[in-house]
């Protein structure tokens, strides 16, 4: 073996590895901003909340927090109010979720059939209008619409159609049985156009010739919808169901605005309970509130997994 | 560039103040101004020669922060601010009584603000004390001002003999009525003396058709259960400062509420439209739309609602009616000022708050009303009422004497960590009686007490 060969072999290995290492280093360097953001903004708060949930941390207390293991979880598990409030959120989700899928789907199919380009664009723009209204304005608008004494809905029912009087007219908001359906209607209206746009995007991706071929083969519109359109929209439906399940189970702004902290109100859900404990009651038991939040999150993850399975793309 | 100019400006302002205070002479003032005028390069030199410490000693300008409704209802506040050049007036991030920002800053021994105007003792004062966010005013408030505060208000604002709330705006719960409605119903145009008379009148209004509803109230406990109980007896607090829901007075108050509800707007128990359901309540809608004759709430509510009437002069106000043999008391509270422990400019803050709370224009606007608001909130100082008694201003309205008179009999809700939340926790339980889900008021109130206790025992 000559000396040159001894030198050449390690060199060839070295030159092959160096670019890889360099590439790897440069990749990590480029990843640092995103990773830093991800860790600080996403990972750290979650771990922080998990840690807090195992302590007796009270925000207003000047005493340091103590590790109490699963104490908060056991207390939350045995707390009837937590489960009752979780049930209220689930009830709202049941009222809200079907409507937020079915109505936008129907609307999207109707708009998709408009062939005039200008009209199709105008309809799409109109659909998006509610989604562009700031949340505060939406809440003010619907709070007025539902107002028992001066709202236009009760005005129509009492003054125009004489179905009710001001002594027995429906009390839409503020703690009655109608409160959750009323909020669900508001939410469905608010998201109608936005969700319809999702379905319109899905409909646009279905090849027209596939639909035409089915019709030529004698399939009626219902069969076309059921066997071609709907399966093709399944991935979009899954995204919407999962996203909106999460938001409907975790609604809080609307509940605080429409129901406040009245524990007897149907709007007092687990999110409001968590907020109440963390920022309102006593010394603000944020350790316990964090445990309630973690349990709520775990329940949601369980159901989301189920929904992903049910709405998974098939065929 | 903007920042540099600001620094230069502040340095020059600090120099000017020190010159006026006689701390530096004209020669020193000119040299410092020249150095400061060099811009950022000059700042380093300025520090070396003493201008920097001068600026640091001055610190930031006086920085008060107000709950936003106060500014909206009292347009005279900017006039007070004009007397404090350089003041950094701000609106507090406390929507719905949220104090988390104050607490979070205090944990870092810091405070963006020097004084918070918007504190109500029974609502959040105890929390702010517990969290070590605020300190007493005693070292800063002039002795003559302390002595001038009406004794019951001073008691409300004190904990362990220390004044943690410098009172500003006084609210007292009483009743108002719409004389257009009551006259139409054939009622005497005067305040009902007893609750029985009140109920008779409310029934007459409803039955006569003078208005759809006879009487209404704000269903939040501190605005209904507590004042109605006080009208029977103000001795309704436990030694630790909780409201005694099982006391005879509280139970009678609950029964009375149910009787009033038979003549009231059916949505009376629903939550309000703003501030987490606390404000914009159904009673306000009923009274402002002239659909009800009698109204029980703190006096500024009927005043504000009557602004929407065809003829606001048809509003009349009176004290809360009494139970037969009752004490005839009511509830009052003040909205006042908290001094941040980690704030700055504490002497200046006291000077500002004194100026604010004694400002005659604010009180004139509050009582006589302005184009934008008629609040009816009153001052907490004896001397101001004395002054008005001696020389009655031409804008003075009769309700002021009424409120002042009520104050002598009124009592504030005791300060406690659960001062406000005990009413929030208990509401569904006493509402069970009001809605007919529980037939025994004592059982309902016992359930309230149990729920509050259970929550307190948690931690």
Image (cartoon, helix red, strand yellow):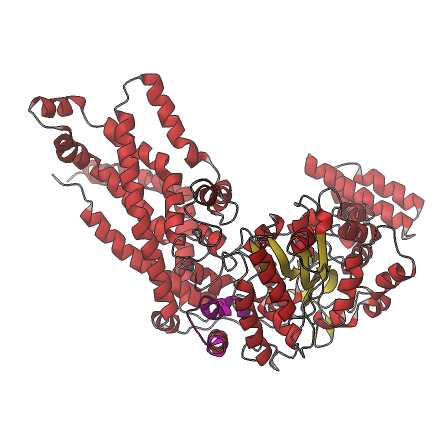
Q: Quadrant of the N terminus of chain A?
A: top left
Q: Quadrant of the C terminus of chain A?
A: top left
Q: Is residue A309 left or right of residue B422?
A: left
Against A129, residue B431 (above or below) is below
Left of B248 or right of it: where is B348? right
Front one among A262 and A7: A262
Q: Is residue A232 magenta?
A: no
Residue found at x 15% / y 32%: A222
Is residue B185 in view?
A: yes
Whether residue A113 is situated above or below residue B160 in the rendered picture: above
B443 falls in the magenta region: yes
Q: Is residue B113 visible?
A: no
Which image quadrant is residue A100 in?
top left
The part of the chain drawn in magenta is B419-444
Identify the main secondary structure in magenta: helix
Image position, residue B198 (x, y; %): 63, 66
Whole-percent x and y of residue B78?
A: 76, 45
Figure check: B80 above or below B452: above
Which sits in the foreground, B198 or A296? Answer: B198
Q: Please state the horizontal and vertical placement of residue B155, each as a whole percent of the image.
A: 73, 73
- Residue B236, by quadrant, is bottom right
Camera-side residue of A78 and B397 = B397
Whether residue B399 sits left or right of residue A134 in the image: it is right
Foreground residue among A114 and B14: A114
Q: Which residue lies most toward the bottom here?
A: B239
């Amino acid at each position: 073996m000559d000396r040159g060969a001894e030198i050449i072999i390690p060199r060839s290995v070295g030159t092959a590895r160096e670019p890889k290492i360099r590439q790897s280093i440069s990749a990590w360097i480029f990843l640092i901003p995103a990773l830093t953001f991800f860790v600080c903004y996403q990972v750290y708060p979650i771990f922080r909340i998990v840690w807090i949930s195992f302590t007796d941390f009270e925000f207003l207390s000047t005493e340091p927090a103590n590790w109490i293991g699963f104490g908060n979880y056991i207390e939350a598990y045995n707390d009837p109010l937590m489960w009752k409030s979780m049930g209220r959120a689930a009830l709202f989700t049941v009222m809200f979720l079907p409507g937020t899928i079915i109505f936008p789907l129907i609307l999207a199919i109707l708009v998709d059939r408009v062939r005039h380009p200008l009209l199709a664009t105008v309809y799409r723009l109109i659909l998006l209008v509610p989604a562009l209204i700031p949340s505060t304005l939406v809440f003010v608008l619907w709070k007025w619409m539902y107002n028992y004494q001066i709202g236009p809905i009760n005005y129509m029912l009492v003054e125009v159609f004489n179905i009710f009087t001001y002594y027995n007219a429906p009390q839409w908001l503020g703690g009655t049985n109608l409160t959750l359906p009323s909020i669900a209607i508001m939410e469905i209206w608010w998201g109608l156009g936005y969700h319809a746009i999702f379905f319109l995007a899905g409909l646009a991706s279905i090849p027209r010739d596939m639909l035409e071929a089915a019709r030529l083969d004698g399939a009626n519109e219902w069969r076309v919808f059921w066997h071609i359109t709907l399966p093709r929209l399944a991935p979009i439906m899954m995204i919407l169901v999962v996203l909106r399940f999460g938001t409907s189970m975790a609604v809080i702004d609307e509940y605080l605005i429409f129901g406040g902290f009245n524990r007897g109100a149907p709007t007092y859900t687990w999110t409001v309970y968590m907020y109440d404990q963390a920022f309102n009651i006593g010394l603000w038991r944020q350790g316990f509130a964090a445990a309630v939040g973690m349990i709520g999150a775990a329940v949601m993850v369980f159901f989301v997994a189920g929904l992903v399975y049910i709405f998974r793309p098939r065929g | 560039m903007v920042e540099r100019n600001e620094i230069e400006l502040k340095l020059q302002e600090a120099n000017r103040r020190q010159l006026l205070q006689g701390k530096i002479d004209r020669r020193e003032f000119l040299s410092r101004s020249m150095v400061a005028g060099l811009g950022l390069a000059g700042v380093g030199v300025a520090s070396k020669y003493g201008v920097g410490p001068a600026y640091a000693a001055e610190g930031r300008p006086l920085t008060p922060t107000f709950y936003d409704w106060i500014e909206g209802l009292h347009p005279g506040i900017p006039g007070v601010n004009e007397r404090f050049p350089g003041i950094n007036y701000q609106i507090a991030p406390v929507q719905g009584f949220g104090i988390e920002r104050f607490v979070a800053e205090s944990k870092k021994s810091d405070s963006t603000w020097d004084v918070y105007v918007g504190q109500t003792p029974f609502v959040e004062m105890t929390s702010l004390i517990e969290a070590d966010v605020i300190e007493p005013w005693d070292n800063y408030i002039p002795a003559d001002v302390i002595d001038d505060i009406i004794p019951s208000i001073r008691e409300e604002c004190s904990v362990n003999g220390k004044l943690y709330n410098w009172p500003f705006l006084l609210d007292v719960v009483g009743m108002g009525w719409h004389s257009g409605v009551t006259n139409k119903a054939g009622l005497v145009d005067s305040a009902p003396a007893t609750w029985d008379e009140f109920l008779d009148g409310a029934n007459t209004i409803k039955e006569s058709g003078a208005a759809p509803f006879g009487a209404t109230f704000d269903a939040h406990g501190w605005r209904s259960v507590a004042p109605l109980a006080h009208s029977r007896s103000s001795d309704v607090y436990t030694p630790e400062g909780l409201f005694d829901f099982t006391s005879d007075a509280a139970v009678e108050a609950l029964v009375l509420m149910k009787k009033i509800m038979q003549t009231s707007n059916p949505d009376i128990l629903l939550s309000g439209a703003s501030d987490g359901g606390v404000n914009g309540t159904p009673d306000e809608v009923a009274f402002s739309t002239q659909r009800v004759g009698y109204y029980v709430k703190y006096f500024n509510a009927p005043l504000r609602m009557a602004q929407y009437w065809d003829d606001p002069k048809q509003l009349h106000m009176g004290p809360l009616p009494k139970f037969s043999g009752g004490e005839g008391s009511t509830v009052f509270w003040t909205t006042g000022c908290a001094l941040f422990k980690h704030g700055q400019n504490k002497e200046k803050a006291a000077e500002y708050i004194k100026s604010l709370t004694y400002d005659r224009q604010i009180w004139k606007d509050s009582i006589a009303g302005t184009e934008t608001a008629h609040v009816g909130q009153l001052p907490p100082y004896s001397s101001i009422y004395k002054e008005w008694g001696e020389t009655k201003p031409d804008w003075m309205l009769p309700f002021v004497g009424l409120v002042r008179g009520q104050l002598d009999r009124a009592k504030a809700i005791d300060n406690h960590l659960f001062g406000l939340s005990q009413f929030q926790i208990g509401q569904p339980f006493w509402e069970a009686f009001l809605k007919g889900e529980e037939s025994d008021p004592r059982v309902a109130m016992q359930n309230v007490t149990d729920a509050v206790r259970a929550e307190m025992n948690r931690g």
